Image (cartoon, rainbow, N blue to C red):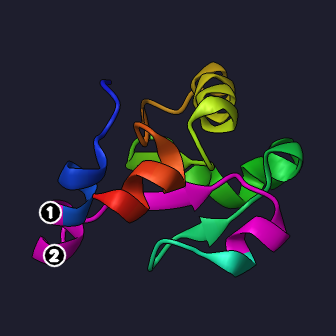
Amino acid sequence: MTDITPAELKERQAAGTAPTIIDVRETWENAEASITGSQNIPLGELPGKLDDLEHLKNEEVVVHCKGGGRSASAKAFLQQQGFQNVRNLVGGMQAYQQA
């Protein structure tokens, strides 16, 4: 699945069709700014949260971090765990805030 741009994500949110959004930044980063409706699961905690995310294996999931690096790792990890439709937010939170 291709990654998602901030503009596309904002359009989907405005239309009420936003996918599940997972913020893989640290909790303190999420506290500073977050995407409405996202859930915060820091990258290091992701393996321990797989059971909680099992129901999303066939759903569209968008992962994001500050700039795209950690979320690229999260995307690869989730795909290895059998998640079928994981997309990385291009440019991360920085790009989303500017879009």
* 18 relative to 80, above or below: below
Q: Is residue 29 left or right of residue 19?
A: right
Front residue of this view, candidates 33 and 70? 33
The image quadrant of residue 19 is bottom left
* 48 relative to 87, above or below: below
| Magenta region | 11-30
Crowding at dot 2, Cα within 10 Å, few <14 / some 14-19 / many 20+, comes out as few
Q: Can residue 78 be seen at all in this image of the molecule?
A: no
Q: Position of residue 94 (x, y in %)?
A: 50, 53
The circle on residue 76 is none
Instruction: Name the residue located 16 percent from the left edge and 75 percent from the top edge.
Output: 14
From the image, tell me which residue sits under label 1. 11
Helix, strand or loop at mark 2: helix
* 32 relative to 58, above or below: below
Residue 24: in magenta span: yes
Name the image quarter holding the C terminus.
bottom left
Crowding at dot 1, Cα within 10 Å, few <14 / some 14-19 / many 20+, comes out as few
Q: Separation of disc 1 and disc 2 at Cα?
A: 5 Å
